Amino acid sequence: MSGIFVPNKDFDLKADSIEIKGIEDFIDETMKNNNYELPMNPEMDFLLIHYSLLERAYENEKEKEQVNGVRKKEWVHNKLKNLSKKLNIVVTSGRGNIQGCQIMFGL
């Protein structure tokens, strides 16, 4: 077993619009029920997430008027901070350094 978990086809990673709740639900479900039938360990396991998923989730929330004037960078920062309370987070973008995301969150 590789220990790599990818959302099933119901969660379209290529979609223009992504629900942040879908990302959060996937993380919660994977942490509880994974291939090892053991809960994930926040001290050892980590989540690798592509920055564009968070950008598209922000745009989706913005369209639904759920961001209340919060800028994208700040919204993403807050989401990462909340997610990092559950698990170590690694953000990748393929763009080099992501401005505003160089902060390390501790558990």
Image (cartoon, rainbow, N blue to C red):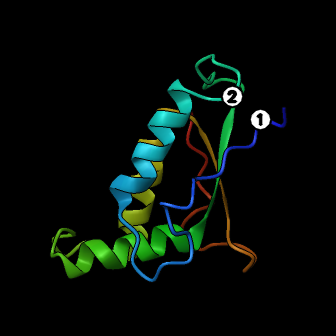
Where residue 75 appears, as percent x and y from the top left, is 35, 65
Residue 107 visible in image:
no
Q: Quadrant of residue 50?
A: bottom right
Q: Quadrant of residue 87?
A: top right
Q: Which residue is mark 1?
A: 3
Judge from the rendering whether residue 27 lies leftward or rightward of residue 1; answer left or right: left
Residue type, mark 2 in image: Asn
Horizontal arrangement in the rendering, residue 13 relative to residue 48 (left or right): left
Q: Are marks 1 and 2 in contact (CB under 8 Å)?
A: yes
User: What element does badge 1 sit on?
Assistant: loop
Q: Secondary structure at mark 2?
A: loop
Q: Earlier in the sequence, mark 1 or mark 2?
A: 1
Q: Is residue 2 visible?
A: yes
Q: Is residue 32 above or below residue 70?
A: above
Measured Cα–Cα span from mark 1 to mark 2: 7 Å
Q: Is residue 62 above or below residue 43?
A: below
For the point 67% across and 38% down, the residue is: 46
Total label count?
A: 2
The residue sitting at 49% across, 32% down in the picture is 86
For disc 1, the neighbor class at 10 Å (few under 14, some 14 to 19, many from 20) is few
> Nearer the observer, disc 1 or disc 2?
2
- Mark 1 is on which residue type? Gly
Left or right placement of residue 67 versus residue 55 in this view: left
Residue 51 screen position, x and y as percent: 58, 69
Residue to which mark 2 is pinned: 35
Residue 49 pos. (x, y %): 62, 57
Above or below residue 80? Residue 87 is above
Question: Which disc number belongs to residue 96?
Answer: none
Front position in the image: 100 or 15: 15
99 or 60, nearer to the observer? 60
